[in-house]
Image (cartoon, helix red, strand yellow):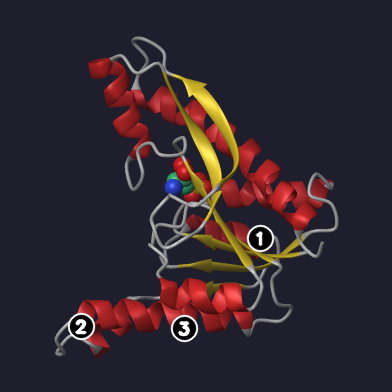
Amino acid sequence: HNLTVLISGNGSNLQALIDACASGDLPNTRITHVISNRKAAYGLERAQKSSIPTTYHNLVPYKKKHAATAAGTQKARTEYDADLASLILSHTPAPHLIVCAGWMHILTPDFLTPISAAGVKVINLHPALPGEFAGAGAIERAWTAGREEGLERTGVMIHEVIAEVDAGEAVVTREVELREGEGLEELEGRIHEVEHGLIVEGTRKVLEGVGK
Ligand SMILES: N[C@@H]1O[C@H](COP(=O)(O)O)[C@@H](O)[C@H]1O
């Protein structure tokens, strides 16, 4: 199976996938393309160190192109997303699955429609449980709810990507308890540990269903 991985930052979850492909934890699977929307993403270096082709897909030229037009931002995102879909599908070998691993850009139907028409699934890693803390800053919001509202646990999920942010059907989930007096950085560390295992488990589960 071929994976395309979308990233925006450090890439520790991408690294977990790279290591799982190498160890056989993800059997018969290889990452054939890594795409970032941020040039400085360290994840791009991780991919290059593993000889994986990389692409930096920059939104700025799209924004500049449409800056003078009404709804320019919307037009820019529409074109950006449509081009992202075609650069993924025109890459050889084509992917069986797209994994969003710390990808911080909301994917619109301009991306999702051509991708699903090509029969390719898209999954995303999100550091919260289904229906909770959708969007950015999920770990910190759960930490604050633990301190202020007595929330006892948060979690991590791998879910299918639909147009509504962090709302697609969950593939795998894992609860993470909130500990009294724990600092935010400690909680982030524990959540990242869980993420690195769950992204491999979720990817494996979806790939087991691919081609059946
Ligand atoms: N969306 C969130 O961004 C972080 C990315 O980490 P990394 O994989 O780039 O290290 C992860 O915590 C992920 O859940």
Task: Find the distance from the CA under tag 2 to the CA under tag 3.
Answer: 16 Å
Residue 82 location (% of width, % of height) = 45, 82
Sequence-wise first label, 1 or 3:
1
Determine if residue 57 is in view: no
Side (left or right) of 126 relative to 140: right
Residue projecting furthest to the top: 180
Q: As shown in the figure, which amino acid type bears the numbered disc 2? A: Gly
Q: Quadrant of the C terminus?
A: bottom right
**What is the crowding at mark 3: few (fewer than 14 residues within 10 Å), some, or many (at least 20)?**
some
Q: Which residue is mark 1?
A: 49
- What residue is shown with label 3? 83
Precedes in sequence: disc 1 or disc 2: 1
**Mark 2 or 3, nearer chain start:** 2
Q: Position of residue 203 (x, y in %)?
A: 68, 50
For the point 70% across and 60% down, the residue is: 50
Element marked by disc 1: helix
Splitting the image into 4 quarters, where does residue 170 fall? Answer: top right
Kind of residue sitting beneath label 1? Lys
Q: Residues within 10 Å of mark 1 (few under 14, many from 20)?
A: few
Residue plotted at (64% across, 78% down): 118
| Residue pointed to by mark 2 | 72
